[in-house]
Amino acid sequence: MDQSHIRDFCIIAHIDHGKSTLADRFIELTGTVSRREMEEQLLDLMDLEREKGITIKLTAVRMFYHAPDAVEYELNLIDTPGHVDFAYEVSRSLAACEGALLVVDAAQGIQAQTLANLYLALDQGLTLIPVVNKIDLPNAEPERVAQELIDVVGFTHDEILFVSAKEGTGVPALLQAVVERIPAPRGRPDAPLRALIFDSKYDPYKGVVAHVRVVDGSVRMGQRVLLMSAGRETEPLELGTFRPQLVPVPGLFTGEVGYVATGLKDVRQCRVGDTLTDAANPAHEPLLGYRPAKPMVFAGLYPTQPNDYQLVRDALEKLQLNDASLAYQPETSAALGFGFRCGFLGLLHMEIVRERLEREYGLVLIVTAPSVEYHVRKTDGNDVVVDNPADMPEPQAIAEVREPWMRISVVAPARHIGVVMDLVTGRRGAFKKMEYLEHGLGESVGEAGDRRVLLEYEVPLAEILVEFYDQLKSSTQGYASLDYAFSHYAPARLVKLDILVNGQPVDALSLITDADKAQVHGRQLVERLRSVIPRQLFDVPIQAAVGGRIIARETIRAMRKNVLAKCYGGDVTRKRKLLEKQAEGKKRMRRIGQVDIPQEAFMAVLKLD
């Protein structure tokens, strides 16, 4: 294919604004997949994506479009996630493209994550095509949303395209706009091979399969290639493209998107962001890779069966190849044994990783409550990073604790400003700015309460980690949207809250909390633990402690056998003797008894108000 007839682009939008449906219409119009094989959300390949109705993994597909000028164009589309937890996936797909379709829902308008993905695309220097989708909805306001794009982003009205991905309205004109507006790849066909690895997965037969965008040169079967960062040479077992299933081809050329089956069995030798080059004639310098994703949420993953430890390690290695934002390292818990401390981009990311490990690798895992990364300065002058509450130094050894703060953007109708402010300030949020998204729309805006406002705050990450998004949605009747990004570290009054079960500290249940809320959180936690930990044959005390001071206690009462059932009257001393014998047995049992703590207990930390 002539390089001038290739277009590499992606679709970026807020979650549930119609990216996957628009991709389906593109595939139908170009005849990439037969009508018999076509199904909804074709590019959402995982069961989890279909169940949750969201895109989790970026997916590439090659389409051939016959333009009205009788020229055939090769369109390489990369479908991207919309949720803020998967922004790293979006950044990788943007690096492999020259242009992007910015899709906005005609009923909902610009949302917080729309702006976040827009800024990512602008940073990469991509050509943007604004698209107002879902114009067929009864409550659609395409002109109002178009005016938002003009006011907030700076597009002109002529640039904006109006489509209905569900019905196919306007989609042919959008395909033609992709060909006309998005530039062709700017690579050098005669230069040494340089191909950017933007994704990868592990295949038991083909080894590591690298998804690549060829920037310079070409790669053909039989040609030995070199992974520049890893320094490893290999000969590809197979080259191919995505249609969207894997289709082998003899070679990949400048500007094209495809895959290279490397045959490598060690997943650590082929990393996302590495550059593939010709082993015989290597490039002088690699392509700019990706800034490593910084995990913001940390949790422990432990197998329920200790013998499965190695299986969990292997599964994490293979999953990390497919999800470069996942970080992990081994750790040991006195309560749970050997496991791994994993870093995630957010709570949804953590949930998806856990479900993928259990479904794809057949594991049964215990997940501890999530935490964030704290910077602790000790009294001896040393600085330590703590992402596990169990590792927090003793209070007398701490000089200062610094916690991460996030800059959050909330887009909501103006009538909900009060409840949003109350929610954020109740979680130690600091107000930054507020602005209305519509300007000068006259009568089309409606009442002032219908206008939408952008609120920006700085909030401690630990405060928005759990249930904040759910509370934001419920308090605004589902209209608010949220985006967040790391801001800075700031000093805080934090303490470690320890949980003792039957007198023994359970490190996996400890948490770090604001000093003023420690007693409230401790009381709530022991009450919840009392309801989820099964009753034993002896009394089990559950205590919350800060330092060496007990601040809350609950007791799980023992299951008791009625030893007096066989006594029909008689001397009271006989009854007392039976009860004393039972009490002695309970004491002995408590000394040697073990309390099994279920998964629900570790997640009880998430339910604190």
Image (cartoon, grey):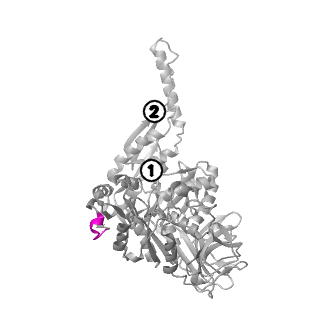
Q: Position of residue 370 (x, y in %)?
A: 46, 55
Q: Which quarter of the image is occupied by the N terminus?
A: bottom right
Label 1 residue SS = loop
In the rendered image, which quarter is residue 207 located in? bottom right
Which mark is on residue 510? Answer: 1
Residue 538: x %, y % from top left: 49, 33
Q: Tell which residue pokes out farthest to the top in this image.
A: 570
**Mark 2 to mark 1: distance in Å?**
23 Å
Q: Amino acid type of disc 1? A: Ser
Badge 2 marks a residue whose secondary structure is loop
* Residue 524 is covered by the magenta coloring: no
Q: Is residue 599 visible?
A: yes
Dot placed on the residue nearer the N-terminal end, 2 or 1: 1
Q: In this rendered view, identify the residue nearer to me: 332 or 261.
A: 261
Q: Quadrant of residue 35?
A: bottom right
| Residue carrying label 2 | 557
Q: Position of residue 20 (x, y in %)?
A: 52, 63
Question: Is the residue marked by circle 1 packed among few (<14), some (14-19), or many (20+) residues within 10 Å?
Answer: many
Vertical side of 134 occupied by 536: above or below:
above
Please give the range of residues in magenta: 438-445
Can you tell which mark lies on residue 22?
none
Where is residue 51 shown, x and y percent of the image?
54, 54
* Label 2: few (<14), some (14–19) or many (≥20) C-alpha neighbours in 10 Å: some
Residue found at x 49% / y 16%: 574
Looking at the image, residue 7 lies above or below residue 433: below
- Vertical arrangement, residue 513 with respect to residue 62, above or below: above
Badge 2 amino acid: Arg
